[in-house]
Amino acid sequence: MKNIIKRKMIKILSGNKETRLTVQVADTQRKREMGLMFVGKLPENEGMLFVFSEEVYGGFWMKNTLIPLSIAFLDSARKILKILDMEPCKEYICPTYDPEIAYHYAIEVNLGWFEKNHIKVGDYVLLG
């Protein structure tokens, strides 16, 4: 059976500004493990939303990821807690990008997308 990835439009609220982002939803263990591995190009306003059933700790790694990404970690209220930049890794052992906080969601986008769109820690994400 093929692993179908759902796509949805989310909105990020930053002050009076609303930024739209189309995301693939990674809401199962398998989808979260695959993430954006082997993706050669990510369209400008697209990304991946990682959904966890409960608060989690720990980081993301970039093994077999071909493009540089930025990642935002969100709490259960969907407030952005931390944003990190991550580099592709084709090595056998890759670094982990750990926000060192608990989070409930994560959003991966092209490197620098949050900064370019003036999205920062403290902003909120609307999922529906």
Image (cartoon, helix red, strand yellow):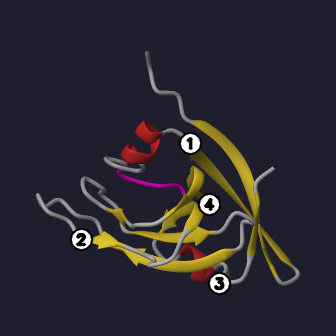
**Amino acid under disc 3:** Val
Type of residue at label 4? Asn
Do the numbered discs 2 and 3 sit on residues whose CB atoms are within 8 Å? no
- 39, above or below 122, in the image: above
Mark 3 or 4, nearer chain start: 4
The disc placed on residue 45 is 4
Amino acid type indicated by mark 1: Asp
Distance from disc 2 to disc 4, alpha carbons, whole Å, reads 26 Å
Residue drawn at x 39%, y 67% is: 59
128 horizontally vs 1: left or right? right
Mark 1 to mark 3: distance in Å?
23 Å
Label 2: which secondary element: loop
**Residue marked by disc 3:** 121
Give residue 95's mark.
Answer: 2
Question: Residue extending furthest right?
Answer: 16
Q: Which residue is mark 1?
A: 27
Q: Is 100 placed left or right of 38 in the picture?
A: right
Badge 3 marks a residue whose secondary structure is loop
**Majority secondary structure in the magenta region:** loop
